[in-house]
Amino acid sequence: MFTDEEVITLFLFGIMNKHREIKTIYDEAHRHLGDGFPKLPSYPGFVQRVNKVGDVFAPLVEILSARGPVLGDWLLDFQPIILAQQGHSFNARVAPEYASRGYCASKKLYYYGVKLHVLGQQQIGSLPFPDYIGITPASENDGKVLENFLPYLPENRAYGDKAYEYLKPIAAAQGIELLTPIKRLKGQEYLDGADQWLSRAVSQVRQPIESFFNWINEKTGNKRPRSKLRGIGLPKNAASCGEWTRRDSKSE
């Protein structure tokens, strides 16, 4: 019998060897690891088994990433995972339980897919350490995701983009200082000097979270539309913004 433990072992072994697709992971196991896994099923059977144990990976990441109390400021942002874009997004039907149609303002792009949200601790001279990772449909408002998640956060300072600006009073009531670039008022052509300086400073502090997403794209190949959602390893409960992979900082 091919066990769940063997499925997880082969999948993680493939990821550690920088394979991005389940087919590539399976082919390597089939060619080179047959003696160690004599009950390895056919490729369709292997895919079914990986999907069956998919819920294991979110808590596993949480356990592996556990560490001490929050020491650095938080950096938060999201990036789109695009399954179809522009005209193709209107007719896309892939994984409707996870994905939906949305708009990415930074890319000026309508797309069908999901959003990957990350809240990570700032680490000077390095990429942020991700404390909270979540996936939501593309149509989910960025600020709403953080709003639903605020009750779980301990006191700290956080840097986000303009989408989170309206949450500053709510965050302040929970002891979280939320800093964002300043939005221009309706009819305002330019920001004044102080607001421009603050906006630039916040953007500079947030730059490492953008580098973090670039690193993810490099490691996963998330630079092109994905035709198969299974390729990005979504857990079954990924559509719920409350079901984030997280380290429970309040309990520390």
Image: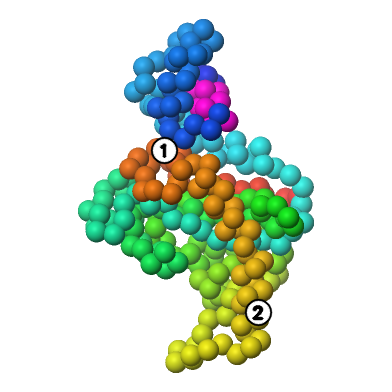
Residue 99 visible? The answer is no
Magenta highlight on residue 55: no
Residue 133 percent coordinates (x, y): 56, 50
Using the numbered discs, state the Cα–Cα distance from disc 2 to disc 1 in whole angstroms. 39 Å
Q: Helix, strand, or loop for circle 1?
A: helix
Q: Main SS type for the magenta part?
A: helix
Which residue occupies 49% across, 53% down?
Answer: 116
Amino acid type at circle 2 is Leu
Note whether 108 is above or below 25 in the view shown.
Answer: below
Question: In the depicted view, which residue is nearer to us: 220 or 131?
Answer: 220
Residue 104 percent coordinates (x, y): 41, 64
Magenta highlight on residue 10: yes
**Residue 231 image label:** 1
Location of residue 208 (image quadrant): bottom right
Location of residue 210 (image quadrant): bottom right
Which residue occupies 60% across, 36% down?
Answer: 60
Residue receiving disc 2: 198
Which residue occupies 60% across, 73% down?
Answer: 180
Residue extent of the magenta highlight: 7-16
